Image: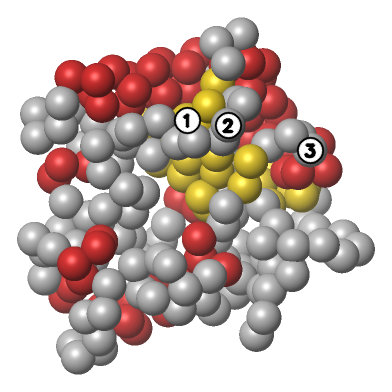
Amino acid sequence: MPFSSTGASEPLPAGFVYAQELLPQLCVDLVYCKSGNFIGEPITGYEAERLILTRAATLALGEVQTELAHFGLALKVFDGYRPQRAVDRFIAWTHEAGDLRMKDLYYPRVDKERLFPDGYLLARSAHSRGSTVDLTLIDAHGAAELDMGTRFDFFDPSSWPQSQEVNAAQRAHRLLLREVMHRHGFVGVAEEWWHFTLRDEPFVDGYFDFVVR
């Protein structure tokens, strides 16, 4: 189904918001609405390029944006709330052995059937709780992404925040992102420089499956 970036807001579960309505200056590029992601096609459950998050996570992102603005930087968000049906699509895709169209771009050193067993993807994603974001830093004026050494969703040890496979400047950019996110209540992970979850997320055990539209 073609996605839309505009339209009237549909009611969301209590505690969730359309993040761009609270943060209209936030740069959003929801990759799973499009064909340039690691599967190579729009993902089930994403019918509009509209970032949905819990209100708590959205307000915390606003604090991050405010701090970054002092340095001429801003955030660019690739994913927020993720329906469980999208995760289920990821699982099904790993069993489609012949579909390797995006391997060179996203997982050149990993067999796709190992993406879940090796922890690159999870059958129960924190994204489905609504307070997890995938993002990077951009120049607030030209919107160019800072060089992080790998692309978003690059399933490889070189994407680990502390990887020595990237240069010092790239590690410094990763550290800057991590430090500012931590200061405003988000926690990162050891395997992905782009992934952060609100420390005091409101739905610790809740996994949602409403469609992004």
For label 3, count other residues whose C-alpha is less than 10 Å away and answer few (under 14), some (14-19) or many (20+).
few
Q: CA distance from mark 1 to mark 2?
A: 12 Å
Residue annotated with mark 3:
24
Residue annotated with mark 1:
137
Q: Residue furthest right?
A: 8
Residue shown at 24%/20% (left/top)? 169
Mark toward the viewer: 1 or 2: 2
Residue 188 visible here: yes
| Quadrant in the picture for residue 166 | top left
In the rendered view, tell whether residue 88 sits above or below residue 29: below
Residue annotated with mark 2:
142
- 1 or 2: tag closer to the N-terminus: 1
Residue 206 visible here: no
Name which residue type carries label 3: Pro
Q: Using the image as rendered, state which of residue 203 and residue 6 is in the foreground.
A: 6
Residue 55 in the image: state x and y as whole percent.
Answer: 73, 38
Residue shown at 55%/43% (left/top)? 77
Q: CA distance from mark 1 to mark 3?
A: 17 Å
The quarter of the image holding the C terminus is: bottom right
Secondary structure under tag 1 reads strand
In the rendered view, tell whether residue 208 sits above or below residue 196: below
Drawn side of residue 174 relative to residue 9, left or right: left
